[in-house]
Image (cartoon, helix red, strand yellow):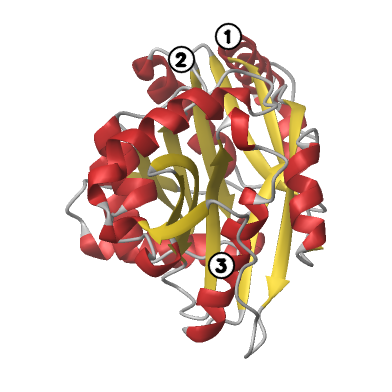
């Protein structure tokens, strides 16, 4: 039976479209809810993002995104379809539009994330040639009403970054020095200073009381961010945590996260979530020590863009009705 597909690109100022997008995303990926406001702010920081909403026979059925990745040469694909509308061609139609956008980004690799246990998502990725390259270990920490204050190493001071904006440049410099050391499958490309400040340091989605720098003799030696999950006022997410090489293995990262846990407890939060790479043994040890518990992993899939394009062509040929003869 033929179906009518309609895909609309969301312009940045389309409030109703962003509300529909957020509702669709939250229905399919409830562990990572978003709000229309968060979506609009994200798009303002990344003006070449593509956001789509799709309909099947006039029913709103799914949404998709093509986002330039902070890993060089890559475009990240978001592609979700409501369960009752799957296997009707919308996910594939989204993919075709995403591939075009990826080419416009200048990318040569397409990336996607799938929650561990999402068999439909893994099958879709495999169908178009995407292969697993990394697992982000997702973890969670329940927050009690009386979490203890941090045990700060001698000679180290923790301060809220919002109260010391004069430290922003030094903190960004430390990020630029340390984050490329993360055990990723490709080198991390640092965002501009302005985007880093907006996303990780002082922007509207950052929780100022829980975003901290560690100082030794007045110099920035560590940082840990905390960002709000606007769709759930009792849940927050750790951003990146990093410590200068000469100050590691002294409890600085542990103290930063302990201080965030204590702040969250005092401010009505019930849960903190974060993720790290399987190969990042030092940060895994910190999280284990602080009582974080595992959630289903977030699996990253990738494939060269030209291979995805070739797979789409073969898939189209396979689905094209053959000519000649009578239909039985």
Q: Please report the residue visible at 39 percent of the width from the left and 24 percent of the height from the top.
A: 101
Q: Nearer the viewer, residue 98 or 221?
A: 221
Q: Mark 2 = which residue?
A: 107
SS of the residue at dot 1?
A: helix
- Mark 3 or mark 2, which is nearer the start of the sequence? 2
Residue 107 locus on image (x, y percent): 46, 15
Which-is-in-front pick, marks 1 and 2? 2
| Mark 3 lies on residue | 259
Residue 154 can be seen in this image: yes
Report, in whole angstroms, how far the alpha carbon at label 1 lies from the one at label 2: 10 Å
Quarter of the image with the C terminus in it: top right
Residue at 42% over, 40% down:
220
According to the picture, the residue beneath numbered tag 1 turns out to be 306
Task: Find out whether the residues at labels 1 and 2 contact each other: C-beta distance under 8 Å.
Answer: no
Residue 240 against residue 226 in the figure, above or below: above
- Nearer to us of marks 1 and 3 is 3
Is label 2 in a helix, a strand or a loop? loop
């Amino acid at each position: 039976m033929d179906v009518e597909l309609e895909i609309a690109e969301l312009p940045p100022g389309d409030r109703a479209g962003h509300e529909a997008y957020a509702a669709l995303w939250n229905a399919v990926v409830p562990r990572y809810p978003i709000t229309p406001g968060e979506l609009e702010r994200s798009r303002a920081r990344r003006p070449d993002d593509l956001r789509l909403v799709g309909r099947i026979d006039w029913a709103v059925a799914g949404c998709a995104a093509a986002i330039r990745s902070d890993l060089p040469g890559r475009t990240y694909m978001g592609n979700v379809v409501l369960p009752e509308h799957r296997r009707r061609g919308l996910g594939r139609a989204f993919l075709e539009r995403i591939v075009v956008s990826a080419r416009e980004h200048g990318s040569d690799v397409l990336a996607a994330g799938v929650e561990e246990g999402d068999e439909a998502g893994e099958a879709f990725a495999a169908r178009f040639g995407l292969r697993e390259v990394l697992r982000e270990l997702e973890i969670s920490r329940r927050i009690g009403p009386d979490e203890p204050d941090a045990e700060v190493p001698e000679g180290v001071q923790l301060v809220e970054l919002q109260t010391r904006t004069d430290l922003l440049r030094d903190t960004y410099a430390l990020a630029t020095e340390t984050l490329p050391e993360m055990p990723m499958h490709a080198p991390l490309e640092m965002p501009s200073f302005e985007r880093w400040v907006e996303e990780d340091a002082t922007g509207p989605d950052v929780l100022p009381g829980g975003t901290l720098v560690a100082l030794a003799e007045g110099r920035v030696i560590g940082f840990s961010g905390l960002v709000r999950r606007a769709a759930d006022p009792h849940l927050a997410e750790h951003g990146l945590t990093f410590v200068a090489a000469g100050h590691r293995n002294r409890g600085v990262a542990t103290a930063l996260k302990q201080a965030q846990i204590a702040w969250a407890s005092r401010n009505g939060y019930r849960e903190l979530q974060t993720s790290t790479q399987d190969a990042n043994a030092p940060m895994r040890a910190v999280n284990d020590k602080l009582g974080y518990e595992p959630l289903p992993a977030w699996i990253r899939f990738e494939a060269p863009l030209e291979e995805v394009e070739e797979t789409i062509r073969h898939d189209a040929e396979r689905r094209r009705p053959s000519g000649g003869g009578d239909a039985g």
